[in-house]
Every structure is written in C-alpha cells, then in structure tokens.
Amino acid sequence: MNKTVRIVLNGQEREVAAGSMLASALLTLGVRGFRRSVKGELRGPLCGMGVCQECRVTVDGRPHSKCCMIVCRDHMKVETE
C-alpha cells in the first residue's frame, strides 16, 4: 500500500508520496519553476543536495527554504514563484 501526505501547493491541496523530499514531489506534480532569478527567469532544482539554492520556496511562511532538503509532511503550505 502506498502512503501519501497532503500538502497545500500555492493554495491547492495536493497529494504526494509520504517520505519524499519536497523538491522531488513538486517535480512529480509538474512544477518546473520554483522561483525567479533577479532577471526574472524561472529557476528549479539543480544540485538536489542543498548547495546551489535554486530550489528555494516558501514553506509554512518561511521564505527561501531549500526544498530539496525538506521531507514532505501533512498539511505543509508551499508557495512557489
């Protein structure tokens, strides 16, 4: 049996695999632009290990959270650019 958790992504409740890292869950949901660069370009995960900071999103009101380092949990609120 596959276990899931529910997250709130940009105001919409979505179901993702329990225990998955938030960056991979967002990619699975089809999110490609996690934030915008200073030039306005969409940015997304690059390194997957918390070094590059390209995967920053707002999690539960905390901006600039590196989502490749965050495990999905029930009812977390995620905001992308």
Image (cartoon, rainbow, N blue to C red):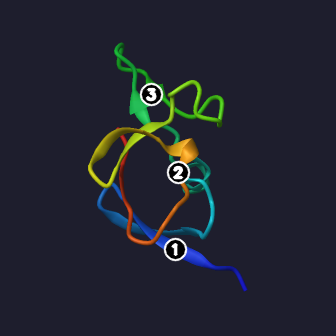
Q: Which residue is mark 1?
A: 5
User: Marks 2/3: CA distance?
Assistant: 21 Å
- Which residue is disc 2 drawn over? 70
Q: Nearer the viewer, residue 23 or 64?
A: 64
Mark 1 or mark 3: name the one nearer the start of the chain: 1
Looking at the picture, which amino acid does disc 3 mark? Leu
- Residue 30 in the image: x percent, y percent? 55, 51
- 17 versus 57 height, above or below: below
Helix or strand or loop: what does disc 1 sit on?
strand
Residue 52 is tagged as: none
Question: Helix, strand or loop at disc 3?
Answer: strand
Rendered-image quadrant of the N terminus: bottom right
- In the image, what residue occupies the spot 35% across and 38% down? 81
Residue 73 lies, in percent from the top left, at: 48, 67
Residue at image coords 53%, 33%:
44
Cβ atoms under marks 1 and 3 closer than 8 Å: no
The mark lying in front, picked from 2 and 1, is 2
Q: Quadrant of residue 28?
A: bottom right
Of tags 1 and 3, the one toward the viewer is 1
Residue that mark 3 sits on: 42
Q: Give the Cα distance between marks 1 and 3.
A: 27 Å
The amino acid type, in three-letter code, at marker 2 is Ile
Q: Which label's residue is closer to the chain start, 2 or 3?
A: 3
Q: 30 or 26: nearer the eye? A: 26
- Density class for disc 1 (Cα within 10 Å; few <14, some 14-19, many ≥20) is some
Q: Position of residue 76 (x, y in %)?
A: 38, 63
| Above or below, comparing residue 10 to residue 3 in the picture | above
From the viewer's perspective, tell me whether residue 63 is left or right of residue 7: left
The answer to which image quadrant residue 65 occupies is: top left
Residue kind at label 1, given as amino acid type: Val
